[in-house]
Image (cartoon, rainbow, N blue to C red):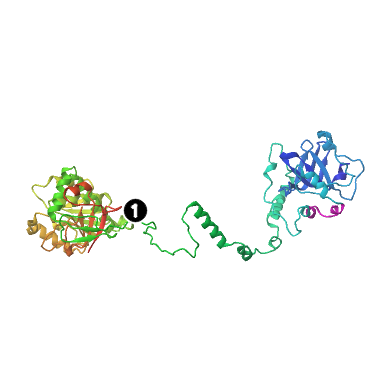
Amino acid sequence: MAAYWLGSLVSINCGETLGVYQGKVSSVDQGSQTISLRQPFHNGMKCPVPEVTFSAMDIKELKILEIPGGGAPAGQTDSGSSGHNGRSTKGPGSAPSSAPMAVPRKGELRAQEELHSPQQCSKSYGDRHLEAFGLAKGFRRRHNSWSSSSRGNNQTTPKKNSMKNGGGLKNKDDECFGDPLEEILDTDFDFEGNLALFDKAAVFSEIETSEKRSGARSRGTPSERTPARYRHDENILEAEPIVYRQIMVPQSGGKEYCTDAGLVVPSISYELHKKLLCVAERHGLTLERRLEMAGVCASQMALTLLGGPNRLTPKNVHQRPTVALLCGPHVQGAQGISCGRHLANHEVHVILFLPNFVKMLESITNELTLFSKTGGKQVSSVKDLPDSPVDLVINCLDCHENAFLRDQAWYRAVVDWANQNRAPVLSIDPPVSTREQAVDAKWSLCLGLPLPLAESAGRVYLCDIGIPRHIFQEVGINYHSPFGCKFSIPLHST
């Protein structure tokens, strides 16, 4: 008798947890009380497996939607549903009273029965399913996954026999990629018609009205806005007028410079510069601290001049830059030795020239002790300097006070070597002198505030050696830092 129902189209309600399944009966096992459906639909969506098996314990209600060949023996009942659930089932011989709704849910079951008519039995299950929702025949849904609502503790186990030989994968591919695009894209989207529905003027008018009521500033329509163009470094917010002369000195040194931002930096005389350093030392900015700051700023500038990250990379270890450091026996020479120590720490080949003197300054002795630990080379004769051009020459030969050094033989010899080497020259803290510079410099680095240097000093740079603002005020200088985010900045002659 069970073979009679094979091929029948049925709807199985498994409750809220498992949902409603529809499909054709493929097998009925009275011994194990199971029924199997092929080509099943779950809650209106096609299942990814070709066959699903149900136990009688999971079935809440079973409806026979269509029987192949017409009728059935009168009084026939479903043994699985009535035997275990205690519910009466509809006889298969009676006329179907419900339409094949894809997703009968709770209160919709009665509505399904009213929608069904005898004429629909002759139609295919898919066509009647689409017509019940008012969809055209040319429209077909894509079902990408099984509904997650069916994944519960009492979930039925799909049969896996049909998955052999790639059958299941082929069905999945057909389901995902089988629909032709022509059936989905029947009509083009009307962009112009939908755009015409948007009234831009009315929307902006409503925005203005709401802003006026709330007290906010009106932005205006796009046609009323004033076009404005700003640079990448320009603030759109209105600010106070910029004061470019922020440093005032009691007595001008005779020359003024300006930064890249346009701030005016006046020069000061050597006497005022010396007084500034004495006051700073009295407040704790000792010579050792100034030497360290000057060495760090000078070495940073030298590393940039040598090529920076393009030259000093692990891939360029075979092309280490060479720097010749020419120092005299004075404080300026100690600043140069400090710079050479930092350069040597950054894998720069440093050759330090310092003449032999019986008695050296304590600051020079201390700097030489540290420099000797870096592996840099120290020479005291011009003959030991390289004959080939170096990458950079750092000049610290001159002193602010002892001009007699220029008359000594070692000074003239090293000056001749520097002028013949053809390497660019960086002068650190060059002095103000009425005499012409012995070594023509391409760059000159001043400390704190610039001195009125001659044109032969090259391009002037200024470095911050850490003098506090109130110390400037003690010597009569109204000071505002022109450095910004840097410790060394270029200066331009005005």
Residue 59 in the image, given as x and y percentages of width and height:
78, 38
Give the labeled residue for mark 1.
Answer: 314
Kindly tell me whether residue 177 is visible in this rendering. Answer: yes
Q: Quarter of the image containing the N terminus?
A: top right
Element class at badge 1:
helix
Total labels drawn = 1
Q: In the image, is residue 120 part of the stretch drawn in magenta? A: yes
Residue 438 in the image, given as x and y percentages of width and height:
13, 62
**37, 92: nearer the viewer:** 92
Q: In the image, is residue 445 part of the stretch drawn in magenta? A: no
Residue 397 in the image, given as x and y percentages of width and height:
14, 56
Give the residue drawn at x 67%, y 51%.
Answer: 144
Outermost right residue: 74
**120, 228: nearer the viewer:** 228
Magenta stretch secondary structure, dominant: helix
Residue 193 located left or right of residue 435: right
Q: Quarter of the image containing the C terminus?
A: bottom left
Outermost front residue: 213
Residue 354 in the image, given as x and y percentages of width and height:
14, 52
Residue 222 located left or right of residue 35: left
**66, 160: nearer the viewer:** 66
Amino acid type, label 1: Pro
> Which residues, given as a range, are shown in magenta?
118-128
Kindly tell me whether residue 24 is visible in this rendering. Answer: no
Residue 356 located left or right of residue 479: left
Q: Residues within 10 Å of mark 1 (few under 14, many from 20)?
A: few
Q: Is residue 491 above or below residue 55?
A: below
